[in-house]
Amino acid sequence: MFSLPVISEKTVARLALYRRLLGDLLSQGRRSIYSHELAALAKGSAAQVRRDLMAVGYEGSPARGYSVEDLIGALSRLLDHPATQKVALVGVGNLGRALLSYFAGRGSQYSVAAAFDADPGKVGLAVNGCPVYGPDRLAEVIEREGIEVAMVAVPAGEAARTVHDLCTAGITGILNFAPVRVWVPEGVYIEYLDMSMSLERVAFFARSKRRTSQQDSALAK
């Protein structure tokens, strides 16, 4: 069993962002980067980048900066499970099918090993190679497959019961796509992805940017 250092949620989010940005740079042929350059890409400060990377235990060179490839490796050793991590999906509607399609064949660190749906017409099918089970087999399959992480893509009214059943079955990490906040016991981490709220924020700031641009144009005349 491997142990993880204690790192805040915000730091983990920034480390994951750094890794994605570094991966883009590596694909473009970039071999090294300084903290202030990575900070500019991440919309942060160089001091913050250096503090975050101290958690990884990787140090750059004042003359050459950080090795992009080596830093990606250090971040991956911290962020990723040593082996491919199995994930469960509850809800095989339009969103659930899109999630299965997204993860299928990507060579990802994560593999959706089992899906669950209350619709008898979907039980027994394989969607993008993932078997679909009825909710009555949730605890059995999760234990058999050794699954610790689950995605929830059910209607809002079903989310609380679904999350409760997942926690009872031994799930300790949940990504909830249902547009509702639900209770989880201590020791279970849950994260919410409410696409409607995200779209509302994007639309608001789009309007705000347009108004600002129009005001600047009017002042310039």
Image (cartoon, helix red, strand yellow):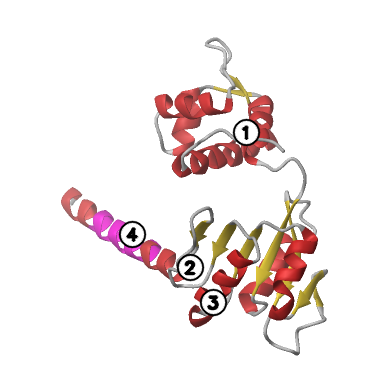
Asked which secondary structure carries label 2, the reply is helix
Q: Which residue is drawn at 48% across and 30% down?
A: 52
Q: Is residue 207 above or below residue 67?
A: below
Image depth: mark 4 or mark 3 in front:
3
2 or 1: tag closer to the N-terminus: 1
Is 186 one of the magenta-colored residues? no
Residue identified by numbered label 3: 161
Residue identified by numbered label 1: 75
Image depth: mark 3 or mark 2 in front:
3
Q: Which of 63 and 94 is in front in this view?
A: 94
Q: Looking at the picture, which amino acid does disc 2 mark? A: Met
Residue identified by numbered label 4: 205
Distance from disc 3 to disc 2, alpha carbons, whole Å, reads 21 Å
Q: Which of 128 and 91 is in front in this view?
A: 91
Tally of numbered discs: 4
Q: In this view, does 68 lie above or below 12?
A: above
Residue 104 seen: no
3 or 2: tag closer to the N-terminus: 3
| In this rendering, position of residue 58 left or right of residue 184 | right
Asked which secondary structure carries label 4, the reply is helix
Q: Which residue lies furthest to the bottom in this view?
A: 121
Residue 99 seen: yes
Image depth: mark 1 or mark 3 in front:
3
Residue identified by numbered label 2: 195
Asked which secondary structure carries label 1, the reply is helix
4 or 3: tag closer to the N-terminus: 3
Magenta span of residues: 202-214
Distance from disc 4 to disc 3, alpha carbons, whole Å, reads 35 Å
Q: Looking at the picture, which amino acid does disc 4 mark? A: Phe
Crowdedness of circle 1 by 10 Å Cα count: few (<14), some, many (20+)? Answer: many
Asked which secondary structure carries label 3, the reply is helix
